[in-house]
Image (tube, helix red, strand yellow):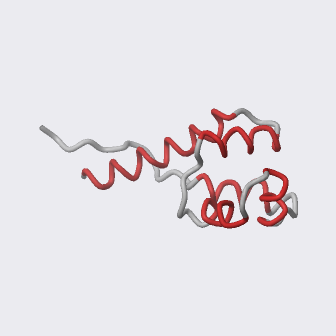
Amino acid sequence: MQPLRFHGRRPEHPGAFLERCYLTPLHLSQSRLAKELGISRRRVNEIVNGQRAISADTALRLAHFFQTSPMFWLEKQQRWDLYQVGRELS
């Protein structure tokens, strides 16, 4: 049996994407985002730094705030997770 592999280029961690595409262009601090979402600054910081996954709860909050869909965020997280597991299994 051949090892499972994730094909394609390395995806961007959803937290890095959040920072690059939303926080930085909107001049939105992690503290402000946390306050707007009703979550801790630590939670936002851990997501942005790739130390925490985006949960369904966080996806719903991000979707509401940024007017996206929750699946937008969950798919980014899932792609990252699949890539990481694929690397571990290779």
Q: Is residue 62 above or below residue 29?
A: above
Residue at image position (56%, 55%) is: 13
Q: Quadrant of residue 69?
A: top right
Foreground pick, 54 / 35? 35
Count of numbered labels shown in the rendering? 0
How far across and down, in percent of the image, does residue 46 sit? 60, 64
Q: Is residue 41 above or below residue 79?
A: below
Q: Quadrant of residue 41?
A: bottom right
Drawn side of residue 38 relative to residue 26, left or right: left
How far across and down, in percent of the image, does residue 80 sit? 49, 49
Q: Is residue 50 above or below residue 86?
A: below
Q: Residue furthest right?
A: 27
How far across and down, in percent of the image, does residue 16 sit? 63, 60
Residue at image position (66%, 46%) is: 58
Residue at image position (57%, 43%) is: 76
Q: Quadrant of residue 5?
A: top left
How far across and down, in percent of the image, does residue 67 sit? 82, 37
Q: Is residue 26 above or below residue 49?
A: above
Drawn side of residue 59 relative to residue 38, left or right: left
User: In which quadrant will I find the N terminus?
Assistant: top left
Q: Residue furthest left?
A: 1
Residue at image position (58%, 45%) is: 55
